[in-house]
Image (cartoon, coloured by chain):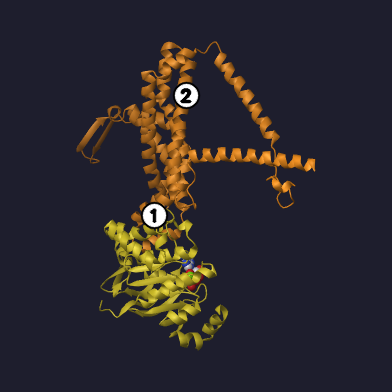
Chain colours: A yellow, B orange
Amino acid sequence: MSEPYVVEARGVRKWFGSNEVLKSITLSVSRGEVLCLLGPSGSGKTTFLRCINHLESIDGGRILVNGELMGYRQRGDKVYELKPREIAEQRRSIGMVFQRFNLSTHMTALENITEAPIGIAKMPKNTARERGMALLDRVGLADKANQYPAQLSGGQQQRVAIARALALDPTLMLFDEPTSALDPELVGDVLDVMRDLAQSGMTMIVVTHEIGFSREAADRVVFMDGGVVVEEGPPTQLLDNPQHDRTRAFLQSVL
Amino acid sequence: MASTTRTVASDDDVVAIPLRHPGRWIAAAAIVVVLGLLFTSLWRNPNVDHPSITEFLFDPRILKGVWLTIVITAVSMVVGTILAVTLAIMRMSSNPVLRAVAFGYTWFFRGTPLLVQIVFWGYLGLLYQQISLGVPLTDIQFFSADTNDLIPALVGGVIALSLNEGAYAAEIVRAGLLSIDHGQREAAYSLGMGPGYTMRRIVLPQAMKVIIPPRGNETISMLKSTSLLAVVAVAELYTAATQTSSQNLRQVELLIVASIWYLAMTTALSIPQYYLERYYGRGTARELPPTPWQQFRGWTGRMSGRWQNRQIARAAAREAVDE
Ligand SMILES: Nc1ncnc2c1ncn2[C@@H]1O[C@H](COP(=O)(O)OP(=O)(O)O)[C@@H](O)[C@H]1O
Ligand SMILES: [Mg+2]
């Protein structure tokens, strides 16, 4: 792991039909760095996250994860999209947490976590279960291992989802508004887990409207609007002393 | 004072008398009477020979017919389901050719009568005397056989039922797949699962709870559709019954025998369906639905509870009058 950057995005462009959603995004994330991505709704934050693990293809630029071109193979000066199973292979090192948890309803909390290690990484079942239990313990839900998602609160489901995303030992974690679908009193537990994760040295990109969390946990905050990075900087600088009107207007609206 | 009894009718402790439904009881009684009359008239009918019903109920020919009906139903449902899943996935594919083929298939097999499809497979031998596998436009042949040997009536019948079933079930499977939130796939992909794995382990199992209930209906329907194979002389239950009655001229009795068996089979089917629904419904409710036994216990409990409530309410009313 000599690569200094876990994510290197250079001039990433994305169109949905005639709508240019990402207009040349250039952004690097170092190992162990926690980057918070702020921006108004529709500014392209989700799309950018989804491009990083190639849930969306990109129409221009390059995204490297751990030094490897994500979703494509370069031959000469041309790039070719990879086969689904090659892309699947690349995604194993990237964990993703969604706004709406997306746990499988037919599996218990533990089964949700062990599915990928057993079925994809071919880990022995016992090892996977032990590690799954350790992950549940880490997110404070060891006693919920055999509960189905419908039996858990939103905050508990999201913590299971975080444990699931960690199950394959990713080197990068992507969070897309992980607390936006939660009742206010449940937000804290999820943010605690994320804070612990950040402290443990995980590289994280977090799309969030939780300014408080960005202030304490982020190494760097990026403000996006209209498909471009408007400004970036350490949390104190960007949050307390924004340089752009758009950043200022946004911060005023969420605070 | 009233406080010594548990039937206090104070203002904040009102024992409600449940709403009565006299209409329901009258309707139920009328239906029972009509059914009873119908059944007696059939039973008393001098043209129905009861001993032959009992005699033929377990006749070896009939039992063989029952068995064949079960086998045909099972095979056609399995093949039909595999076809249906394939067609449903094709319908949802991004490849327009696959989509069009799946659409055309469903359109054709749902749009023509099942009876016609069965007869068509039965008469395939008239259309193609030989079926052979070889390199087109050359004389090279790996394999060649007489159509009627290769596809006997039974196989033709099963093919017809399966193809037809596939077309109907495809829509059910598709509805099931569409009912699964796209986020399920995204989460699976983000964990490094491929499309096939995601379909098999994540999407289909969750779609099952939408797919299973109508599939139970389809199975019952299939069980009865097997009787259509009579037109190509496959000795399933209905054919066995009519062939037997053509010898002993007890048509009505044998139809009753066949109906008893069809009813028995469709009734027995509800058991696996119930447990399948329970299995695939796991995790969707906070608690699993009760088994029939638990339901029965709950019902008797409720009935006796209701009865007790009524006694309490009556006692309270009496007391109120006394005061
Ligand atoms: N699958 C899609 N198809 C078409 N347009 C999309 C799609 N996903 C997102 N968009 C559009 O892209 C823009 C950015 O969306 P998104 O990345 O979700 O923004 P954010 O997460 O910052 O709110 C929006 O205008 C949205 O309507
Ligand atoms: Mg978003």
Tell me the amino acid under the disc marked 1. Ile
Q: Nearer the viewer, residue A58 or B26?
A: B26
User: At 48% from the left edge and 56% from the top edge, which residue is drawn?
Assistant: A150
- Establish if A237 lies above or below A5: below
User: At 45% from the left edge and 45% from the top edge, which residue is drawn?
Assistant: B278
Q: Position of residue A221 (x, y in %)?
A: 44, 81
Q: Position of residue A152 (x, y in %)?
A: 47, 60
Q: Secondary structure at mark 2?
A: helix
Q: Position of residue A62 (x, y in %)?
A: 34, 75
Q: Nearer the viewer, residue A123 or A8?
A: A123
Counting residues from the N terminus, which is met first, the one under dot 1 or under dot 2?
1
In the image, the residue with mark 2 has its CB under 8 Å from the nearest atom of ligand 1: no
Q: Which residue is mark 1?
A: B202
Distance from disc 1 to disc 2, alpha carbons, whole Å, reads 41 Å
Dot 2, how many residues are within 10 Å of its Cα: few (below 14), some (14-19), or many (20+)? few
Q: Quadrant of residue B303?
A: top right
Q: Report whether residue A177 is seen.
A: no
Q: Which residue is mark 2?
A: B260
- Establish if A193 lies above or below A118: below
Q: Secondary structure at mark 1?
A: helix
User: At 39% from the left edge and 33% from the top edge, which residue is drawn?
Assistant: B73
- Relative placement, left or right, of B250 versus A30 is right
Q: Quadrant of residue A229?
A: bottom left
Q: Mark 2, chain letter? A: B
Residues at badges 1 and 2 in contact (C-beta under 8 Å)?
no
Quarter holding the N terminus of chain A is bottom left
Quarter holding the C terminus of chain A is bottom right
Q: Mark 1, chain letter? A: B
